[in-house]
């Protein structure tokens, strides 16, 4: 058997990183961040604890990469041609894409919302999360301001709060929560 090439080694490395990431996300979503140990993650991933530290400096770094990866994806869903003239269709598309993501990445959202209720954990990430959040918030504020809505920041925060509530209820009751109907009511708020 010939030695692996650098590109083959990189593929293996990326596969291990993805495996650890996916296992940690599932365990954080199921057991919570504080109750999930590095040993649990390594055991479930079928790797040694030491190997995990080759890929991630700490459990906190792993959490940070999971959460921020989700936020980068979230922010990437808001596609606007002109931030000074945001179109309603662009906001609707953003909402629809987030609902698609909510359905697809159930564990991510379960983990994320559980973190928001754990201040000691969420504070580790709050500054970074707020940077992404404010980027989207500023676009929504611009959208509402252009339409002459009084207190556009309040309206934008309210829209986010409603969406968060929809997401939490959906995660709590995937089988019977009326997600599509809730989406339609959310669009009416625009």
Image: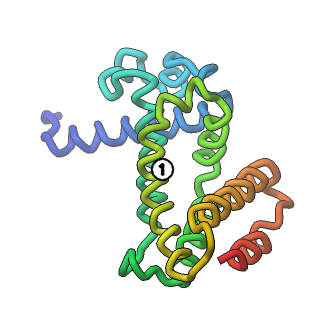
| Residue situated in front as seen by the camera: 180 or 189 | 189
User: Looking at the image, is 39 positioned above or below residue 110?
Assistant: above
Q: Position of residue 111 (x, y in %)?
A: 62, 39
Q: Position of residue 56 (x, y in %)?
A: 35, 27
User: Looking at the image, is 87 positioned above or below residue 49?
Assistant: below
Locate the N terminus and report the quarter of the image it occupies. Answer: top left
Secondary structure beneath label 1: helix
Decide: few, some or many residues near mark 1? Use Cα within 10 Å; few <14, some 14-19, many ≥20: some
| Residue situated in front as seen by the camera: 129 or 155 | 155
**What residue is at 82 percent from the left and 52 percent from the top?**
173
**What residue is at 49 percent from the left and 19 percent from the top?**
38
Which residue is farthest front? Answer: 150
**What residue is at 55 percent from the left and 37 percent from the top?**
25
According to the image, label 1 marks what residue? 70
Q: Is residue 3 left or right of residue 73?
A: left
Which residue is farthest right? Answer: 176
Instruction: Name the image colouring.
Output: rainbow
Q: Is residue 71 left or right of residue 40?
A: left
| Residue situated in front as seen by the camera: 58 or 8 | 58
């Amino acid at each position: 058997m010939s030695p692996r090439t650098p590109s083959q080694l990189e593929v293996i490395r990326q596969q291990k990183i993805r495996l650890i990431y996916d296992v940690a996300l599932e365990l954080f979503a199921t057991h919570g961040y504080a109750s999930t140990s590095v040993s649990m993650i390594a055991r479930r991933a079928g790797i040694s604890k030491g190997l995990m530290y080759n890929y991630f400096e700490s459990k906190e770094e792993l959490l940070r990469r999971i959460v921020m990866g989700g936020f980068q994806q979230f922010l990437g869903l808001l596609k606007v041609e002109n931030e000074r003239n945001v179109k309603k269709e662009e906001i609707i598309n953003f909402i629809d894409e987030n609902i698609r993501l909510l359905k697809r990445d159930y564990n991510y959202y379960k983990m994320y919302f559980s973190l928001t209720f754990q201040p000691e954990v969420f504070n580790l990430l709050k500054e970074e999360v707020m940077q992404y959040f404010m980027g989207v918030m500023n676009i929504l504020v611009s959208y509402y301001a252009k339409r002459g809505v009084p207190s556009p920041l309040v309206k934008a925060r309210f829209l986010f709060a409603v969406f968060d509530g929809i997401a939490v209820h959906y995660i709590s009751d995937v089988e019977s929560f009326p997600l599509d109907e809730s989406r339609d009511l959310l669009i009416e708020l625009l």
